[in-house]
């Protein structure tokens, strides 16, 4: 299957900073594959408590990009 060949992504832009609140469904960051730029939305309400993968970082699919604290 040609559509399932992506093994890593590049973080393009974080839309939130550490300490900012998030709402479920709100855009958290943008990442790039070899084919397109995709928005990743927050899976829950919370606070962005950690950024593991900075803008420009390349990470494996399934890798951790950050952490959300749920109050």
Image (cartoon, grey):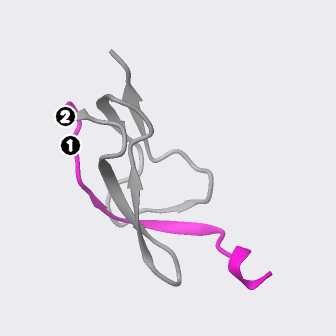
Label pair 1/2, CB-CB below 8 angstroms: yes
Residue marked by disc 1 = 17
Q: Residue furthest front?
A: 25
Q: Helix, strand, or loop for circle 1?
A: loop
Q: Residue furthest top?
A: 71
Q: Which mark is residue 42?
A: none
- Taking the magenta stretch, the answer to whether it contains residue 21 is no
Label 1 environment density (alpha carbons within 10 Å; few <14, some 14–19, many ≥20): few
Location of the C terminus by quadrant is top left
> Which of 18 and 70 lies nearest the eye of the viewer?
70
**In the shown orientation, is residue 33 left or right of residue 13?**
right
Q: Which corner quadrant of the image does residue 56 belong to?
A: bottom left
> Which of 25 and 51 lies nearest the eye of the viewer?
25
User: Could you tell me residue 67's position as x and y percent?
Assistant: 41, 34
Q: Helix, strand, or loop for circle 2?
A: loop
Query: Residue drawn at (62%, 51%), measured in percent from left and top?
Result: 62
Q: Is residue 4 above or below residue 40?
A: below
Q: Is residue 49 above or below residue 7?
A: above
- Taking the magenta stretch, the answer to whether it contains residue 2 is yes
Q: Which mark is residue 20?
A: 2
Q: Which corner quadrant of the image does residue 18 belong to?
A: top left
User: Could you tell me residue 37's position as x and y percent?
Assistant: 40, 75
Query: Residue drawn at (74%, 84%), measured in percent from left and top?
Result: 2
User: Could you tell me residue 42's position as x and y percent?
Assistant: 38, 43
User: Could you tell me residue 50's position as x and y percent?
Assistant: 34, 35
What range is drawn magenta here? 1-20
């Amino acid at each position: 299957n040609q559509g399932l060949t992506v093994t890593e992504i590049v973080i393009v832009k974080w839309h939130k900073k550490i300490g900012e609140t998030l709402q479920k469904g709100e855009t958290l960051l943008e990442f790039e594959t070899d084919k397109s730029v995709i928005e990743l939305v927050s899976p829950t309400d919370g606070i962005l408590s950690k950024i593991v993968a900075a803008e420009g970082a390349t990470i494996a699919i399934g890798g951790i990009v950050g952490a959300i604290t749920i109050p």
